[in-house]
Image: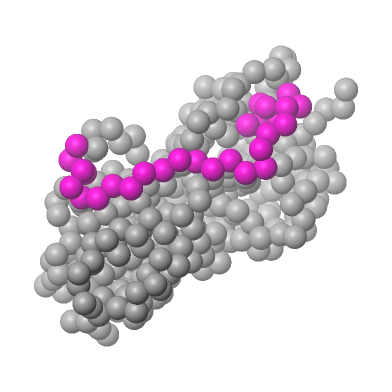
Amino acid sequence: MKRRTVLVAMAAAPLGAMLPVTGFAQGKPIVLGFAQVGAESEWRTANTQSIKSSAKDAGIELKFSDAQQKQENQIKAIRSYIAQKVDVIAFSPVVETGWDTVLVEAKNAKIPVVLTDRAISSKDDTLYVTFIGSDFTEEGRKAGRWLVEKEKGNPGPVNIVELQGTVGSAPAIDRKKGFEEIIKSDPKFKIIRSQTGDFTRAKGKEVMEAFLKADGDKINVLYAHNDDMAIGAIQAIEEAGKKPGKDIIIISVDGVKGAFEAMMAGKLNVSVECSPLLGPQLMAVVKDIKAGKSVPKRIVTQESIFPMEVAAKEFPNRKY
């Protein structure tokens, strides 16, 4: 039998039902090369920990690299893994486009690809075996639906500022799209400013400071594409003499512990869940592919939404 190899592309996503772990060849351990996006957020740190601990638990040898949020670093890491002839290459695509060349190289090397957490934009879907991850568009819709319900009966206008994620990344594109899809049905909702905060706390604070200087008295709502940017923005709002969660409604995505702490303090109104605990699911898929089993082309993870009213009750259950 021909030895098959696996390439896994990984980003940020929640944990759904685990696939069965059975039927892989005994002997030498599977070698997984994983090119992580970086360490830009609390979410990403938890994601990395999940991958590392799950690989160890599964008996999979992990080669890990940190791309520091640069696509060229990920491409370099993937090429290194191809040269090392690893069994699996996993990576979190920093952005959606620009992957075809290196993934064709992986395909020619007979290395299957699995995308996790973030998708890529490519006309050739044979470049990867499966994509495990969240439905980012639905996360945006959940945020939009919560806001529409919250502002029911308010004649408006409802002026929104938006902290986008990394430019060109799947979660930034899709969370914006899903949110706008919902709020566009009512003209009272207006996004008056939208700028990237690059998914980081420091940049979220910096951009929110600029928003407040430009439109401080007009802003009713902040929609942040992740919790870290929202937490940075909360600092900026407080420093401007306003009350986050009251003077400005704050909606974010991820559901990390820091967000729950902010909700319990009354400073964040709601967080849409995007679980980073993908490790067990990823390792199970890698083993299934190595065993020659068929896996679905798209595996969507299940997520919840947490308004501040349930934060104290839910907090003890949070693992990240």
Q: Quadrant of residue 73?
A: bottom right
Residue at image coords 85%, 46%: 108
- In x, y percent, where is residue 292? 76, 27
In magenta stretch: residue 109? no
In magenta stretch: residue 286? yes
- In x, y percent, where is residue 229? 34, 61
- In x, y percent, where is residue 8? 65, 41
Looking at the image, residue 214 lies above or below residue 14: below
Q: Give the colour scheme of this rendering.
A: one colour
Most foreground residue, 285 or 83: 285
**Is residue 105 found left or right of 21 in the rendered image?**
right
Residue at image coords 41%, 43%: 303
Q: Residue furthest bottom?
A: 214
Quadrant in the picture for the N terminus: top right
Quadrant in the picture for the C terminus: top left
**Is residue 3 found left or right of 283 in the rendered image?**
right
Q: Can residue 97 be seen in this view?
A: yes
Residue at image coords 54%, 32%: 281
What's the magenta region? 285-313
Q: Which residue lies furthest to the right in this view?
A: 1
Q: In which quarter of the image is residue 297?
A: top right
Most foreground residue, 32 or 253: 253
Looking at the image, residue 215 lies above or below residue 12: below
Residue at image coords 40%, 66%: 182
Q: Is residue 165 visible?
A: no
